[in-house]
Amino acid sequence: MDTALHHPSRLEDVSSANRSESLPAPSGIRCEMSAPETSQEPLSPIEAFDSRKIAELYSQSEYQQMADEFLKVLDHLQLRTYTHLSQATSRRFNDFATTFLFYFTREDFRPGDPYLLKFIDLNSIIANLVAMSDWKTTDTFVSLVLQQPHNYGRLLALYSQSNSLEIDIKLLFNTHAQFSNRWLLSCFKNYSLGCSNEVELRKLRKFISYTEAPLFSELAKVNHAYFAATYIDFENDGLIKAQINRSFQQLPLCKREIVNKPVKGRVAVLTSMWFPTQSVYRSQYPFLKELAKTYDMVLIALGKKREDFDTSLFSDVRYYSVVDDANDMSAIDPNDFELAYFPDIGMSTESILLSNMRIAPIQVSNYGHPVSTYGSKIDYWIGGRETEVIETAQSRYSERLVLISGSGQLPVPIHYSPTFPQLSENTISIACSWTAMKTNSEHLDRLSEIQRRSNVPLKFRFFPGGSLRMNQYLPFANRLRDRFGAKCVDVFSNINYATYMSELERCHFALDAYPFGGYNTSIDLLNLRKPIITLEGDRFYSRSTAFCLRKVGLGELIAHDPQEYITKAIHFINNSHYRNDVQRRLNAVDLSATLMDTATDAASFVQAIDRLCGR
């Protein structure tokens, strides 16, 4: 990868960068690691890393061995997410980051293209590692590399949406499309973190809008881009999804003609998310439980096998994984399915691939991941009559929209007994029970305005769950602490459900995210008798919480524009009498007869399937 990339639009920045052969370490960073603490446990790669060994290898021009040492640590950071750094661990992170960045940006460090591609694939890991160190960003090193010949591979490993400087994405792709494609797909892995920063979100939107990227060359990795597109730019996500669908449909595998001899009442359910703690399962199980009474269902479990898959509703269980063998279609070819049901397209590569094939005469999806596929081979989308704006809804789907009663989702029973703790009024604790990708910078600005106008101290309690991986947690948490103040924020790591519910109980009320609210989180909160203020939009994902609030008689907590959302939140915080009155009314609601009543809507779902199957 001997190509050199020069960036004319950044000449001023480049000329002002440090041009010396070596870079000073940040204040307080030691260039040699202290001896690791004595432990009976095997040392992790970050603990075992020795910067002196790297220096010795460099003196001998053993660049591939150096790369192997760096990759040991980066691979470790891809698998283990740190939620706290002790002083000693922080030193190790700083030592590794400084050593890696110093040698990786040396002009003569050339381990070869196969190694550089590995580093490009780890772009997001590198960005998060540096964010956890005293360096914070790779800006200095990107500027340094831009001045060098033979810089292209190293530049793609270091440059991402987290950099303050900007390189034209078209320039990157014109230099080498295949390697830039690997870089772009790696950047998309960090969308959960990037959405929470205005600059990063703006860059991600530029990245996602670059439709000339040959995504078809890396289909095994495109699920990150497919899934991330909606959260990065929900107004234009259909463009990249349509492009990905077209790319899949060009594959010989997707052109394969599946042998299908449909048997009436035989339904395939294709999912990677059918386990009880997953939100797709929690909002779809009552539908399929009702469907199983009159249909014979086969589970096609997608992706990596899981021991916690719930197979109780199915007469047969089959597996399909692109990692094991994408060409092994024995799970679906031949088949006797009358209908194929996809509850979570986009949450696995397998679901995207199979949705672009004709598996059964009738192919259907729903809100498991709540947006249209925009151009796959799904025929129908089952939506909720009370969560769609009926006049405009069809325009948002490439599938034919079939509306059923209710929201198009149903809750499962909550297995948690509330304790109703007594809460102090000195500080108002607010539940922000959203995944990280829903924590976008525009909505955080609203929270900042609410904090500014509050008459009492606030504590925002964020519950991003398992959405922060690959060491995104600490950069995300630090970003929120910097914005609101460390004492005004709790950011929980991936805690279990009982702990999550217990911590929600310690909140006075909840603020919903926008534009991506949460159906299951609303069910959790209302079962705990926690009021929610929501901003209602014009799509399912910004209307499901409003639906739940209307079910329990609290439509007054629904705002219809951002300013009203802020005003309602401020009134709820500053007026304790009103807050107590809303709480009293919510406590009196019979949830089993309102929010948790699933019989009518489950029957409506089955009736829709019956009609599609010609019953």
Image: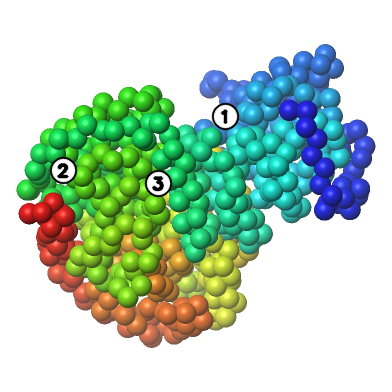
Which residue is at 59% across, 44% downward?
213
Left or right: residue 166 compared with residue 377: right
Q: Which residue is mark 2?
A: 338
| Quarter of the view holding residue 195 | bottom right
Tell me if residue 464 can be seen.
no
Q: Which mark is residue 346?
A: 3
Residue 120 x/y as whole percent = 64, 34
Residue bearing mark 1: 76
The x, y position of residue 416, in whole percent, is 26, 54
Q: Mark 3 or mark 2: which is in front?
A: 2
- Residue shown at 17% from the left, 49% from the top: 288
Q: Nearer the viewer, mark 1 or mark 3?
A: 3
Identity of the residue drawn at 57% across and 29% down: 76
Spot occupied by residue 171 in the image (x, y as percentages of width and height): 73, 46
Tally the marks.
3
What whole-number distance in Å separates the C-alpha atoms at marks 3 and 2? Answer: 23 Å
| Marks 3 and 2, the one that precedes in the sequence | 2
The mark nearer the N terminus, 1 or 3, is: 1
At mark 1, the secondary structure is helix
The mark that comes first in sequence, 2 or 1, is: 1
